[in-house]
Image (spheres, rainbow, N blue to C red):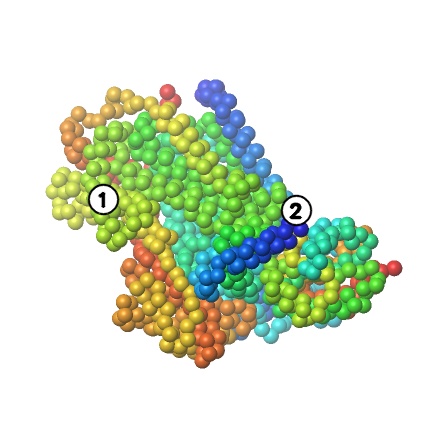
Amino acid sequence: MLLADLGQIGLVLALLCTVYATGAALYSVRTNNAGLLESSRVASVLPFPILTGVCLLLVLMLVNGNYEVAYVTRVTSQSMPNYLRVTALWGGQQGSLVFWSWLTSMFIAFMMMRDWRHERDMQPYVTAAACLTLGFYLILNVFYESPFEKIWVDAFGVTSTSIFPKLGTEIFYPADGNGLNPLLRHPGMIIHPPMLYIGWLGLIVPFCFAIGALAVGRRDDVWIRASRRWTLVAWLFLSLGLILGGRWAYDVLGWGGYWGWDPVEIAAFMPWLTATAFVHSVIIQEKRGMFKHWNMVLIILTYALVVLGTFLTRTGVLSSVHAFAESSLGVPFFIFLAFSLISSLALLIWRWDRLQNDRQLNSWLSREGMFLLNNIVFMAILATCFWGVMYPIISEALLGQKITVGPPFYERTTGPMFAMLLLLMGVAPLTAWTMMSLKRLGQAIWKPAAASLLGIVVALVFGVTNVYAILGIWLCSWAAAVNLYEFHRGAMARRKTQSVGYGLALWQLMKRDRRRYGGYITHIGIVLMAIGIIGLELFQTETQGTVAVNESLTLEDYTLTYTALHEFETPDGRLVTAATVEVYQDGAYVTTLQPRRDFYFESRQAMTIPGVHSTIEEDFYVLLVGWKDVAVEGASFKIYHNPLVNWLWFGSLILIIGIGIASWPEKRERRVLNAKPMPKVAGAPA
Amino acid sequence: MTADSEQQRSPLFYVISALVFVALAALLWLLGSRIIRGTAPPVAGEIAPDFALTDFETGEIHTLESLEGKIIVLNFWASWCVPCATEAPELEAIQQAYADRDVVVLGVDYADTETEALAFLEKYEITYINGPDLGTRISQAYRIKGVPETYVIAPDGTLAETIIGPATSAHLSGILDDLLP
Amino acid sequence: MRFLLRALLLCAAVFLWSVSSVQAQDAPTDDDVNDIAKQLFCPTCENIPLDQCGTDACIQWRATISDLLADGNTEADIKAYFVAQHGERVLNVPTARGFGLLLWLSPLLFAVIALGVYIRFARNTQPVKVVQAAPVTATTPQADYISQVEAELDRRRGL
C-alpha cells in the first residue's frame, strides 16, 4: 500500500470521528447518558492526533519527492530546499486545506480537553458545533480536494489524477515537479498563512461556546469567560498574520506598499474587524452584564465572515494574487455557509428573550457608551468593506458588467471612520463606568489634550502643511497622550496609597490588571502604526526612470547612482539580475543597495525584490523594473520615498506585545472561573 | 418570566429579524447564482452567448444574427500573447481553406492596444475578420480565462467546441468537416 | 459605432490641439505615465494597478498611455479612451454615476444608520439611581480616581 492511501484513510477516519462525536453528543442530551457524552468528547479530540499523523505523512512525501502524488508534483520540485518542501504543505489548495483541518482539530482538542465539570450542560452543543465545523472541512478534504490523489497513466500515455485507479491505468512517476509558486518562497509568506489560519480558526472556540450557551439558554457570561483567552490569542495571531502579510507585500511584491485593498485582503480583514469589536464589547458584558445580544451577533458574524472569506478565496469567486485556482468547492462551501449562518441566527432569535441585559445604558458619556460607539464605528467600517467586496459581484450579476473597486474607494470612505476610532481611543479610557458628566470628563481630559497639541507643533516644525495630515497626527498624539496618561494616573494613584516608587507602582499596576494595561499598550501600538500609515499614505513620493551606468536619479533629498548590473544563476533554479546602486543623501554617500529581479525557470515567473535603505524617519525603496543591454541604455528603476513607514512595523511589535500581555494567563483565573456559582442568576429585570 | 418577555418583543424586533433574513437570502442568492452560472467558459452544447464585434478595417458590426446560418470560429487573441503568434497562421489556413463554405473566422482582440494589434495582423498577413473586444464585453460573455481561446459555433447557434489554448488547423478542420453537410 | 465616433472625436481633438499649440513638447516621462497608470487596472492583472503590473499586456498599455500623452491628450481623455476600449473595469473605482453612485452613497448610508442606532441607544439612557452615586468620601476628582483604581484592582483580585 502506498503512503498516500494511508493519508487518505487517516482523513476518512478523522471524518468518521467528527460524525460520531456530533451524533453522540446530541444523542446524549436526549438520553442523559454521561458515558455517551464522554465518548463523544474522546471522539472529538481524536481527529487531532490522526490529522497530525496525516500532515506529517504529507510533509514526508513532500520532502521525499513522491511525485506520483499529484499535490507533490504541483507544489514541489527537485531544486527546492527541504524547508520549502515542508512549507509547501500550505502552498496549494489541497495541502492548505488539510493544514486548515489540522489546526481546527487542534483548537477543538484543546477546547474539549478542558475541565467541563461546570459547563456540562453546554458541552454537547459545543461539541456538536465544533465537530460539525471540522467535519465540513474534512468532507472537503476527503471528497473534493484531497492532497492524496495520485497520477495515473493509461496505455496511450494520457495522465489523470484520482484516488482510485481507473480501469486500464497504472501509477505514473514523474521525474520532477512544478515547484512552489515563487511568491510563496519568502520567509514572510511561509509564516503569514499559518498565522492567519490560527487567528481565523481560533475564533471557532468562542463561537462554539456561544452556540452552546444559546442552545441551553444560559444568560450568564460563562461562555465569554471560558473562551476569553482563546479569543485574545486568536486575535493576536490574526493581527500578526495581517501584519506579516503586509510586511511580505512590502518586501516581495515590489509595489512600495503594504496593503492594496485587494478583495482577498479585505476578506481576511473583515473577521479582524468584528473580532476587534468583540474583544472590546465582551468587557461590557463581563463587567456590566450588558450587550448580551450584541456579543452573540458579533461572534456569529465573525465565524460567518471566516467561512465567507475562505469561500470567496478558495472557490475562485474572487480572483486575486492571493486566491487559489478555481475549484469544485463552490457548492459545498455555499451550503455550509448558508447552513451555519441561518441556523446560528435562528438560534439567536429563538433565545433572544433569554438574553436580558442586567443593566441599561446610564449615560452616553460612560465607558459603556464609548464602547457602544466604538462597536458601531467598527460595524460601519465592516459594512463599507463588505459592500466594496460584494459590489463587483453584484454589478456582474445584475448588469453583466465587470468593475473594479480599488483603493481610492476604501481610503476615502473608511479613512474618516478610522479617524473616529482614534478619537474614541483617546476619550474612552478617561471615562468611568456607569456615569460620566461632561464636567468630570473635562477635568480628566485637559492635561492629555494639552499634551497632544505638541503633536501639531512637531508636525508644523517638520513643515507639514497638509490639513488631513495635521489632523491625523493630532489624533495620534491625542490617543497616545491619553493612553500614556492612564499609566501615569494609575501609577501616581498607587504611589500615593501604597507608598511605593513610581516604577514599582507602574509594574504592580500592569501585573494586577493585565488585560486593561495590555489593552492600553495595544492602543499605543495602534497609534504608532497609524503614524506610519499616515506617513506612507499622504507623503509617499515616487519616480521612475532609465539611467545608464554612472548616471543618477533623484527623489526628495536622495540621489541614486547606478553602478553595475550582475546576472547569475542560482542552484535553486533562479536567474538573478541584480543592479548595484549607490545611494547619496544630500550629496553624502549613505549606502549601496542591490535591487534585483529573480526569474524562476520552473514556473516562468519573475519576482521583483527591492533594495531598501531604512531609517526611523523614512525608507528609500528601490526597484529594478527593467533593463536592457547594460552598455547601451542602462536600467530602469522605480524609487519610492516612504516616510515614517517603520513606525508601522515598530507599532505592530508594540501591538503584539500589548495583546500578549493582555492574554497572558493569570494563575488564579482557572480556579476562580470554576468557583463561580452556576448557573449565575442574572439581575432581576426591572 | 417567558410570558413577560414575550410581551417585551416589539414589532421592530420582528421587522429587523425579517430584514436580516431577507438580506441573508439576497447574499446567498448572489453567491449561489455565481456558483451555478459558474466562472468557467461555456462548453459544447450550450447556446453561444451573443456578441457584437466591430471590424478593425470596415467598422462593420458582426453579431450572431448577422452571421446566421454560418459556422463561426470565434478566436480570442492579443498581440502580447506568445502562443497566439503560432496560432494565427493556423487560423489563417482555415480561413483560406473554408472561405467559400459558409465558415467565418472571427478574431476578438482582447485587452490589447490598437497599434500593436494592427501590426500583429499585418505581420501574420491575417485576412479574416478582426476587431477589438470593446468594453471586454465579448470576453465576459464567454468568460474566457485567458488567450488564446477558440469557440466553434454551429449554424444553429449552439457551441460545437471549446478550445482552451492554441488551436491547430488540423483540429479545427476536423470539427468543421463534421459540422459541414 | 460609439467607439468609432469617440475615436474620431479624439483624433479631431488631437489634431486641433496640435495645430493650435505649436509649442515644443517634451516626451512624457515614466512618472507622467505612472500617474495615469496608477488609476487604471488591466484585465490581465486582476487587482494589481497598471503601474505595478509586469505582464506584456500592461507594458503595452503603458506605452499606449505614453503615446497618447505625447499626442497631447489629457488624463481625462486617456482614461475615457481606455474605458471606451476595455470597459468600466479598467478604472480603479467606478465613476459616481448610475449604478456606480450606489457604491459611493452606501458608506454615507452606513454612517447614517450607525448614527441612528447610536442615537437610539443614547436617548434611551436611564440616569443612575441615587444609591449608586459616587461614595461620599470622594471629595476631589483625584481622590475619587484613586479609589476607583483601587476598587477596580480589587475587583480583579477577587473576581
Q: Identify the residue under disc 1.
A: A453
Label annotation for residue A491? none
Write the residue at 38% across / 42% down: A416
Which label sits in the foreground, 2 or 1?
1
Query: Which quarter of the picture shows residue A335?
Result: top right
Amino acid type of the residue that numbered disc 2 sits on in the rendered structure = Ile
Q: A243 left or right of B166?
A: left
Whether discs 2 and 1 lie on one chain: the answer is: no
Q: A97 left or right of B93?
A: left
Q: Is residue A552 visible?
A: yes
Write the residue at 65% across / 60% down: B109
Amino acid type of the residue that numbered disc 1 sits on in the rendered structure = Leu
Q: A101 left or right of B136?
A: left
The quarter of the image holding the C terminus of chain A is top left
Q: A504 left or right of C3?
A: left
Is the residue under label 1 in contact with that under label 2 (CB below 8 Å)? Answer: no
**Foreground residue among B169 and A253:** B169
Write the residue at 53% across / 33% down: B20
Q: Is residue A49 visible?
A: no
**Secondary structure under badge 2?**
helix
Chain letter, disc 2 residue: B
Instruction: Examine the rendered structure and indicate whether residue A79 appears above or below residue B16.
Output: below
Dot 2 alpha-carbon crowd within 10 angstroms: few under 14, some 14 to 19, many 20 or more: few
Q: Position of residue A452 (x, y in %)?
A: 23, 44
**Secondary structure under badge 1?**
helix
Dot 1 alpha-carbon crowd within 10 angstroms: few under 14, some 14 to 19, many 20 or more: some
The Cα atoms of the two marked residues, 2 and 1, are separated by: 57 Å
Instruction: Examine the rendered structure and indicate whether residue A308 appears above or below residue A286.
Output: below
Label annotation for residue B36? 2
